[in-house]
Image: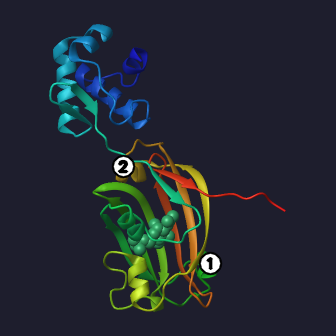
Amino acid sequence: ESRGLRDTQRSGPLYKRLAAALTGLIQEGLLKPGTALPSERDLSESLQIGRVTVRTAYRDLLNAGTLESRHGSGTFVSGSVQRMEQSLWRLSSFSADMRSRGRVPAAKILSRTIATPSPEEAFLLGLGLDEQVLRLDRLRLADGQPLAIERSVVPLKFLGASQGNEGSLYDALAASGNRPVRAVQRLTAVILDRSSAAALEVKAGAPALLIERVSRLDDERPVEYTRSHYRGDAYDFVAELRIGE
Ligand code: 16G
């Protein structure tokens, strides 16, 4: 452990390097939420660095919310990421899924444009190249915690007056009588690039699941093409399997 702590960052004040090393261990999942950290004295002894250095590093991480102190029992890794199980079979929206878990869903709009579809989007959505789509980039949060970043492309003709401006896209579609009822989705393991990782508050290079979904209306017309990056540390996708023929 101490080798890892020393290797992570090589320059800057020692307390900063220690704080960065601890953050790295937490983000890599080697120090799990709820884990107790060594006392200031134990860590300064085992790393052979001053107690003030350890105290300052801990203080920075406490201020950042990465660590939390519990009275009388010490310093702990904040109980931040709550891992969730998600069915691979049920078609649901981010908002509905979070509500069913008792969490508060939110969307931060990163970009929103109305344009003609790219050839790929037109093909996947069964559109003419001159029709209009809404292209919506959103960060998805639950209880203020970022869990996914996604780009949704929706034919404008399926959206009502809200034009997907607020809250749940599926709610907006349902409100205009265009509820998605069927979807095909593909899951692919990916590494997050720097900007997606920053938005999701994980380390650059952290793993994610890229989930591409094409949803359809009752009459089979495609209603959505969405590419979502779901944080790898937040989700387990679960399916029940039956023996094949
Ligand atoms: C989920 C869907 C996404 C859909 C969104 C709608 C996955 C992998 N993706 O993120 O395709 O567009 O929900 O959510 O589940 P909303 O109704 O809350 O906007």
Q: Residue at x 23, y 27 (%)?
A: 75
Residue type at mark 2: give it. Ala
Q: Residue at x 27, y 30 (%)?
A: 76
The residue to which callout 1 is attached is: 124
Tag 1 secondary structure:
helix
Q: Residue at x 34, y 30 (%)?
A: 35
Position of residue 193 relative to residue 70, above or below, is below
x and y, in percent, of residue 154 in the image: 48, 81
Nearer to the camera, 103 or 170: 103
With 112 as the anchor, is 242 left or right in this view? Answer: right
Tag 2 secondary structure:
helix
x and y, in percent, of residue 151 in the image: 46, 68
* Mark-to-mark CA distance, 2 and 1: 30 Å
With 205 as the anchor, is 70 left or right in this view? Answer: left
The residue to which callout 2 is attached is: 198
Residue 210 location, quadrant: bottom right
